[in-house]
Amino acid sequence: MKRLAFLGVGSAIILGLGVMGASPAFADNGPHVATSGDMTVDRCAGCHRAHTAQDSYLLKTAQTSLCASCHGAGAPGSTTDVINGVSTAAGGGALRAGGFTKAAIDTASGVSKTSVFALGTPATTTSKHDVGADGTAWGGGASGQGTTMALECGSCHDPHGNGNWRILRPVAEGGTALTFPSPVSVTSVTKNATLSSGTTYYYDVVTSAANTFKVTNPVTFYGTTTADGLIGATVKVVTDTTHFTVSMRSVNVAVAATGGSVGYANPLAFAGVSGDGTTMTYKTWNVHGLAVGQKVTITGFTPAGYNVSAATITATPSTTTFSVAGTTTAAVTATGSMSGIADALGTKVYTTANYWQVDDHNYTGTNQASTTGTGIATAGGPTGFIANVSQWCSTCHTRVLAGSGAWDVNSGDAMYTFEHRSNNGKEGSPNCIQCHVAHGTNASASGTYSSAVGTEITGHAGDSFLLRVDNRGTCNMCHNL
């Protein structure tokens, strides 16, 4: 059985199991979610037994088998067959995440990322996330190839629902929540003409107090005079505790910036909030991907008036700000965090006609960039799905979160020393699931060079590592060699 591949299953605020019940439904409004309006006592008996349970958590059978009783081949209750990687709904299609036994990805098609992939015939998976067995979370832990851990469906998904996209747990069981250095005030941001070249630009940053940023950390600027566009820039050099250099691709801030603050691009934390008596507008450290009508829960603010429970979003002025109704006008002395981000609005789409499309098909806000089944995102802003997926994966694969310019930044890690960017916050730009699927792939790694890629990872030469395209063809999809 293949070991866990490079990618974790899902997003920071992110995959979905469907249902337990007699008729098909979606995870966001089915029996997994308490707000679906059907929390009768009888529902508990679908999964649990009080005295005759056969698995932990009082489950009536082993967890993997229990989930497959709805999400397996021909199983009632759900149209998402995660075992064979297909939907059984009318019109069907291949699941975006592939499948654990079979996947239906046409892994040989396309030579550029604008290609629309035709769906293949379900074929045996060549790599997958192991469920019900030990596997290796590549890049997990402090050193070495990775950490060994056991996965169950419930390791990633919350069977009782939690308001997150695809009912994903905020941190996978066995994973570790990412730590985020506290934001600090900025004294100056100056373009480094010596380092800047091509479409990669470098900026020397001076902070007014000591900071704990490290090489490869993605950071965001707020409130500076000209550098607010630097979202998810990568720390390239740390000179001392108040001087460091960041790199950013395709963002050219020509003049020096002053004031404001800089912090880790944490999608769950805030850069600030203000109130005018009728509306409270929050600034996030990363793109939020939220839409008008969704609900959020916000905690930890001082004054407490800025803390809200299941507040409805009334406006999204930008990709890093959103508003809710509120009467608070007091000055902020401490910033909080966000939780309970509602699942995307509208009917959920778990299948795809294009395995290279990396925008969120379920997103219905004004930042939606493309429609279901068409090419890659070409306009509009990012969605929460794309902005946060890499940070979610990194709760298990703790050493593979890499920002802009990480190809030229020595992380100091003996094995994961230089890395391709995996944390971007933009649709159509590098993130974990642009190259990898979450459940299992039928891609091959039989090429002369591709088959040797795994030799540095003991016993894994020729592993397809959950990649979407044969023979590491994802390189071609962007670089079109």
Image: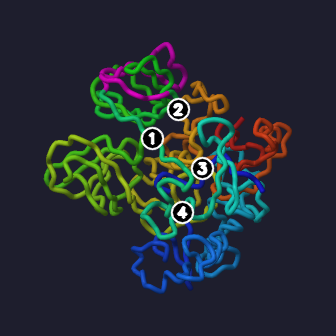
In depth, the one of 102 and 456 nearer the eye is: 456
Label of residue 399 in the image: none
Q: Label 1: how many residues lie within 10 Å, few (<14), some (14-19) or many (20+)?
A: few
Q: Which element is circle 3 on?
A: helix
Indicate the position of residue 149 as horizontal and vertical percent values. 64, 52
Which badge, 1 or 2, is on the more N-terminal residue? 1
Q: Label 3: how many residues lie within 10 Å, few (<14), some (14-19) or many (20+)?
A: many
Q: Which element is circle 1 on?
A: loop
Which badge, 1 or 4, is on the more N-terminal residue? 4
Indicate the position of residue 337 as horizontal and vertical percent values. 34, 49
Q: Amino acid at mark 2?
A: Ser
Label of residue 157 in the image: 4
Relative to 54, 291 lies left or right: left
Residue ID at (35%, 29%):
227
**Gap between marks 4 and 2, in whole Å?**
30 Å
Label of residue 179 in the image: 1
Cβ–Cβ under 8 Å for marks 1 and 2: no
Q: Amino acid at mark 3?
A: Ile
**Residue indicated by mark 2:** 404
Q: Amino acid at mark 1?
A: Thr
Q: Amino acid at mark 4?
A: His
**Residue indicated by mark 3:** 433
Indicate the position of residue 192 as horizontal and vertical percent values. 45, 16
Residue ID at (75%, 61%):
120
In depth, the one of 340 and 345 nearer the eye is: 340
Of badges 4 and 3, the one in the foreground is: 4
Which badge, 1 or 3, is on the more N-terminal residue? 1
Residue ID at (51%, 30%):
249
Cβ–Cβ under 8 Å for marks 3 and 2: no
**Gap between marks 4 and 3, in whole Å?**
17 Å
